[in-house]
Amino acid sequence: MKKEFTLDFYGRKITVETGWLAKQANGSCLVRYGDTVVLSVSVMGKTIVTQDFFPLQVLYQEKLYSVGKIPGGFIKREGRPTDEATLAARLIDRPIRPMFDENLRNEIQVVNTVLSVDQDNSPVMAALFGSSLSLGISEIPFDGPVCGVVVGKIGKEYIINPTVEQLEQSSLNLTVAGTKEAICMVEAGANELSEKAVLDGILFGHEAIKKLCAFQSEIINEIGKEKVELDKAELESDLVSAVTKYAYQNILDAIQIKDKLQSAAKVEEIKQQTIGYFTSVYLEDELLDDKLKQVSKILYNLEADAVRSLITEQHIRPDGRKMDEIRPLDAMIDLLPRTHGSAVFTRGQTQSLATTTLGAIGEHQVLDGLGIEEAKRFMLHYNFPAFSVGEIGRYGSPGRREIGHGALGERALSYVIPSEEEFPYTIRVVSEILESNGSSSQATICAGCLSLMAAGVPIKAPVAGIAMGLITSKDEKSYTILTDIQGLEDHMGDMDFKVAGTREGITALQMDIKIKGVTKEILKEALAQAKKARFEILDVMEDCIKEPRQELSPYAPKIETFTINPEKIKDVIGRGGDMITKIILESSHVKTVNDKDAVKVDLEDDGRVIIYHSNQEIIAETKRRILDVVREVEEDKIYTGKVVKVEDFGCFVELWPGCEGLVHVSELAHERVGKPKDVVKVGDEIIVKSLGYDNRGRLNLSRKAALPKPIKKEEKKHKEEKKNIE
């Protein structure tokens, strides 16, 4: 039976429809937010899977019909998810995952299908709302509701779910998610805002989240199904005691080995010894395989407990550092001679090699998604090869992790990238992670910033990133915040809180947690500790390179920018592109436009012309030829031109490349001309006078008008007689 629920949310209406679409799913709802429409469904598998982790999958499916587009390419249907769709799925997954019991083993899928998009009403926020609600009204065990909002800031005012126009003016683009009690996910970009301003934005967003959670609770109370009791992967208490007694102390000692690989190897050795021991103990047990799976899970839990106990009770980190101490830092630039910019940033056993490549504006990335943005000129790509953690693995297309980390780095640096008017280049930064022991996304930001400065990109200020961690005590009454978490602390901890920014303020923020939520006090303390660490890292980076280089790499394209009459752009392009092709080929002295040494020309609708090449002389020649094409012919002015074609009715004269006019046979000479070829031939240079353009836009020239007027016989005789008299 169809039911409809409505909420007036900060001046806009949210409508939820249930009971008539996708009724065979465990839970489904249609969320309308303005003209944005998202269908969210949740489905649970009937049987327990064999994996030893909670099998949750969150999908965010973009349909291009939702914005009135037909997919590009030959196939004309949606293919693999765009980066934006992948990031949206990650953003929804992160706040709802902690709301499940991690011991559940029934596979759960949450599928969001975007059916209609109103750009002023976020489909991602509608999908997050729908994901939580579809789970909440289903029989699937879920400890929600969870909701999210976007927070903007214009001047001193914070705005909930800003429109596209408001976001363009906003100094903050913050997505915050949480329950009615606490915050559980933060994703933000900021224009160098203070820690206080960002924290105030998070808390402002949480107040709005409470209203959405209350709305969901009303719906769940009215139509929600009774939650089912599911079998869980429970551990035998006797086995837990036996394994703990056998292995805990050894694991505690092993995790305190400072070198990551040595520590990991020792822990693995202890685990194998333990499994071997209990294999012999239960060799005759018909449930041997189940026992050994439990032993593996117990060993994982013991490792997590050892890390937690070491930090919260003994105040000792696995590698011996203080709670706010950063691992050893190192930075260098110019590792690679032929790239436009390169840098290596190392923090402990985490290392990023970053390169910067500069290209023409026309080399921007074309976006085929649901957003209004159709292209972007700054890109950051993150690669995480398996060898960076001493393992073998698959190599291919980037996964969700690579896309997510790349997007975070891109966001952090985007706020200091110069505008297209200041620096008319497409900019690509690539981070290759060579070693990883936690916080590789923040090493990417540091290395990427250094490579930009080495490439001569005039960024506003250096940007550094740091990852903070949170370890709560077993009784959850106390907590410890860690600076610069390593892999083990990230893996076993309760929070991964990444903060990037300049000395002036924050440019990017990302927080993921494994517990139900964090408080204002934890966020405030973590931000203050992160600021101190960020300044320490910036000191090291600025010792390496203090400011962006004034000159570009000799291998980077040089640039010339000037403006022409926008109406003349079509003349520069020519019919079918013949004129611009001719200019490129002749200026570059190359055979084809695909030649790597060909000059690149970008023509903007506002009349801007941008020319790129590594050779300044070729740029100058290209500019001269373009200016010749757009040069205006002045009426009644005399020019020297070259005859390029002779016809029976006259000849065509080229004043400069791209500018030709007709000298009619009657305008060739003062005397009568029978055949133009008797007076001029192809290649002759002659002087002509401009007669202006006819009503069809054709240029008319006159040789006769440019020549001295001949003296008539009577005038000549008169002059001779006058001379004789004198």
Image (tube, grey):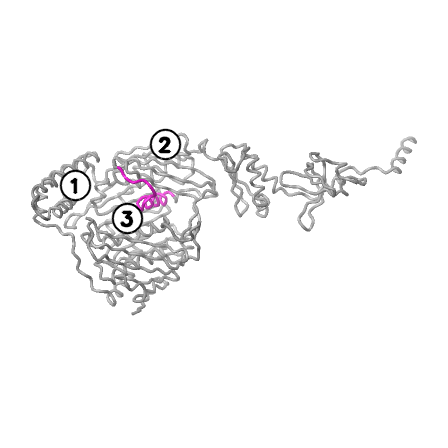
Q: Nearer the viewer, residue 110 or 620?
A: 110
Q: Pointer 2 and pointer 1: residues touching (CB < 8 Å)?
A: no
Q: How many labels does the image show?
A: 3
Location of mark 2 (residue): 333
SS of the residue at dot 2?
strand
Instruction: Indicate left or right for 553 with 542 as reference.
Output: right
Q: Which of marks 2 and 1 is in front?
A: 2
The part of the chain drawn in magenta is 392-413
- N-terminal-most mark, 3 or 1: 1
Residue 411 colored magenta? yes
Location of mark 1 (residue): 315
> Which residue occupies the extreme right position in the image?
725
- N-terminal-most mark, 2 or 3: 2
**Three-letter code for the amino acid on which mark 1 is drawn:** His
**Separation (CA) of disc 2 from disc 3:** 30 Å
Instruction: Indicate left or right for 633 with 417 as reference.
Output: right
Quarter of the picture containing the N terminus is bottom left
**Separation (CA) of disc 3 from disc 1:** 23 Å
Numbered badge on residue 511: 3
Residue 461 colored magenta? no
**Three-letter code for the amino acid on which mark 2 is drawn:** Ile
Quarter of the picture containing the C terminus is top right
- N-terminal-most mark, 2 or 1: 1
Question: Where residue 495 sits: x, y (%)?
Answer: 24, 47
Q: Pointer 2 and pointer 3: residues touching (CB < 8 Å)?
A: no
Q: Is the magenta stretch mostly helix, strand or loop?
A: helix
